[in-house]
Amino acid sequence: MARHELKYMEAAIAVAEELNFSRAAKRLRLSQPAVTKYIAELERFLGVTLFVRDHHVVSLTEAGRAYVGAARIGVLHAERAVQAARAADRDAELTLNIGRSPYTDPFFTSTLLATRLPLYPRLRLNLSSGFSCDLAHDVLSGELDLALVIEPPLSDLLTSVKIDESPFYLVMSKEDELADHPSLRFHQLANKRWILFQRQSHPPLYDLIQRLTEELKALPSAIQHFMVPEEAIPLMSDPGGVVIVGKSAALRIARDDLTMRPLDETRLKMNTLLISRADNRSRVVSELVRNFMRRMNHLNIDDQMSLPIPD
């Protein structure tokens, strides 16, 4: 059992996070019978029940929660050990995998990538892009060390640094009557044609917008969707359209005969966060976050950071 303990821990973590054996198997690139076998063998070895299965619904027992919590730390240390050995072999420091949402302000990404660590002069930062909810999942699974995201799903397994808070912005024609206002509220958008990000880009934010518009009775005449903000520009060729985006996206597309105004709704904000796994005690991650904090403070960015950093 000891020689293969890592695969059992990985199987238990995947099932605990997915609460579904099929999804856990797909994530681990294994067959479902293999994952089911690993869990059965693990429970038999431990002499406890980790998961309760009831009509295809999977839930964790108290023993399961205790085991998975410790297993996450064990897997993380095992991954770090492998990375450290490979880095030492090629005389290089560890590579940190950083994720970013395309909707975050590029300034934050460039500042993070420009951060230098005196203790790790050969540190490599490997950057990848993805939607915020997907990036949060990748941080939880250990594929990413850190991620710059917009309003990620809440999880006790994540810890976060609040980098920025800004309203949504509306992009419209300079000839639109809405452009006469310094800021706008949802009720002023009623019966307008909305151009909005696709739901799969950020389901929680999309659903929040839908709830608020129904609550405020500010329903659009129609909704058109885009995947990336630049796709909204040709949709503005027809009059009466309003694009709803974050500040950085609005700045990219508000050009020529288009202008932008803030959406003044206190319940709808775009918070940019730097997230990490709560049990990540990597010293290089700690140093990167510390130096990033100092750099942001030096650039007169409001310091709202609360990420627990180990000494």
Image: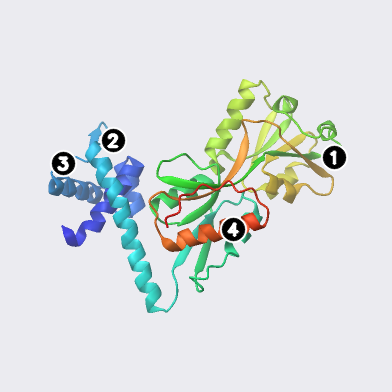
Q: Residue at x 32, y 60 (%)?
A: 77
The secondary element bearing badge 4 is classed as: helix
Q: Amino acid at mark 3?
A: Val
Specify few, some or many for label 3: CA neighbours under 10 Å numbering under 14, 14-19, or 20 or more.
Answer: few
Q: Which mark is in front, 3 or 4?
A: 4
Task: Name the residue carrying label 2.
Answer: 59
**Residue 163 visible somewhere in the drawing:** yes
Task: Name the residue carrying label 1.
Answer: 174
* Residue 179 against residue 8 in the figure, above or below: above
**Marks 1 and 2, Cα distance to the nearest angstrom?**
54 Å
The disc at residue 294 is 4
**Marks 1 and 4, Cα distance to the nearest angstrom?**
40 Å
The secondary element bearing badge 2 is classed as: strand
**Marks 3 and 4, Cα distance to the nearest angstrom?**
47 Å
Q: Nearer the viewer, residue 172 or 307?
A: 307
Specify few, some or many for label 4: CA neighbours under 10 Å numbering under 14, 14-19, or 20 or more.
Answer: some
**Quadrant of the snapshot with the N terminus:** bottom left
**Residue 51 visible somewhere in the drawing:** no
Q: How is the image coloured?
A: rainbow
Q: Which mark is in front, 4 or 2?
A: 4
Disc with the residue nearer the chain's start (1 vs 2): 2
The disc at residue 48 is 3
The secondary element bearing badge 1 is classed as: loop
